[in-house]
Structure formats: structure tokens, C-alpha cells
Image (cartoon, grey):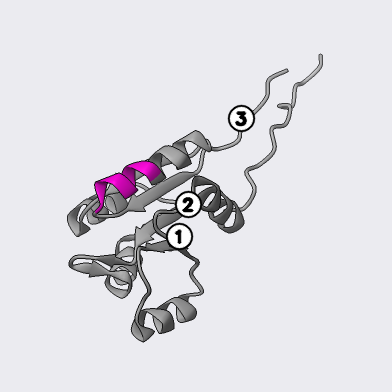
Amino acid sequence: MSVEAPRQRRILVVDDDERERSMAARTLNEAGHAVDTAATKADLIKLLAQHDYDLVLADLKMPGLNGPAFYKTLKECSRGITPPVIFSIKRGYTPEYANFLMRLAAPVLMKPMPAADLRLAVERLLPAAPASRPASSLAS
């Protein structure tokens, strides 16, 4: 009898801050997810062309790629269904960002984000992984 392992979730971390990007990727890897990282819009577009993501963690205020511009790029480049997004931010956001986030109903984590908060936010957005189950076997 064999056991099917749950499918590993693929998460994309988009942040221009190397330290924040690395910490988030490490936390998500340790939680059992496959993680890719992007620091620029070009990186984002390249990775979206290569993979389907279950979730994206994105900096709300990147140079040249703020939240609304990021989300537009994500929708245009996603292959199929646009994945859920968790935004991260260091400081308060403007009413423009507040309206955007309310329309999107996207969660926001403050930086530096504690690992436990990131794991909890991801668990809330991703459906539970299929439980391991025995594979069917035919008896002769």
C-alpha cells in the first residue's frame, strides 16, 4: 500500500528588499511550500510565465510597481486563475491604497512580519492540502 503525499503549494514572494524577501521565503519554505522570489517587475513577469502560483506575497510599495500596478500585471500574466495575494508594507498607506485593498479584500501584513503571522495568513488563504490517503490496490 502506498501513500500519496500532499501537493506542495507554490508561493511567489515579490519584494525589492532582499532581507524581507529572504526572510519570507525562508519562513514559507520551512512551512513546506515551494517558494520563488522576484525583486523586480521583469522577474515577476518571467516567473508568472513559467509557473502557476497558489498564492503571492507582494510588497505594496515597490519602486515602479505599487500595489495596483502589481495586481494589474499579475492578472495579465497569470496563466489561468489569478492567485490570492497577501500584501506587505513597512509604514501606513494612503487612502488610495486603502481603497485598492478594500476592493481587493487583500490581507496586509506589516513589516517586519513575524514568521507566525505570515504562516497564519497563508493558512487562511490557501485551502487545506489534501490529506494523505492510501492508494487503491486491486486484489486478485
Q: Quarter of the image holding residue 70?
A: bottom left
Q: Is residue 72 above or below residue 30?
A: below
Q: Disc number at residue 54?
A: 2
Q: Amino acid at mark 1?
A: Pro
Q: Which residue is mark 1?
A: 83
Q: Amino acid at mark 3?
A: Ala
Q: Disc number at residue 56?
A: none
- Residue 81 position, x and y percent, is 45, 62
Q: Amino acid at mark 2?
A: Asp
- Residue 49 position, x and y percent, is 28, 52
Crowd rating for badge 1 (residues with CA inside 10 Å; few <14, some 14–19, many 20+): some
User: How far apart are labels 2 and 1 at the CA level?
Assistant: 6 Å
Residue visible at 35% across and 63% down in the picture? 90
Q: Which residue is mark 3?
A: 5
Q: Is residue 104 above or below residue 73?
A: below
Q: Earlier in the sequence, mark 3 or mark 2?
A: 3
Disc 2 + disc 1, Cβ < 8 Å: yes
User: Which residue reaches farthest right?
Assistant: 140
Q: Is residue 56 left or right of residue 72?
A: right
Q: Is residue 107 left or right of residue 46?
A: right
Disc 3 + disc 2, Cβ < 8 Å: no
Range of magenta residues: 17-23
Residue visible at 73% across and 27% down in the picture? 134
Crowd rating for badge 2 (residues with CA inside 10 Å; few <14, some 14–19, many 20+): many
- Quick one: 86 or 127, which is closer to the camera? 86
Disc 3 + disc 1, Cβ < 8 Å: no
Residue visible at 31% across and 71% down in the picture? 72
- Residue 20 position, x and y percent, is 33, 49
User: How far apart are labels 3 and 2 at the CA level?
Assistant: 17 Å
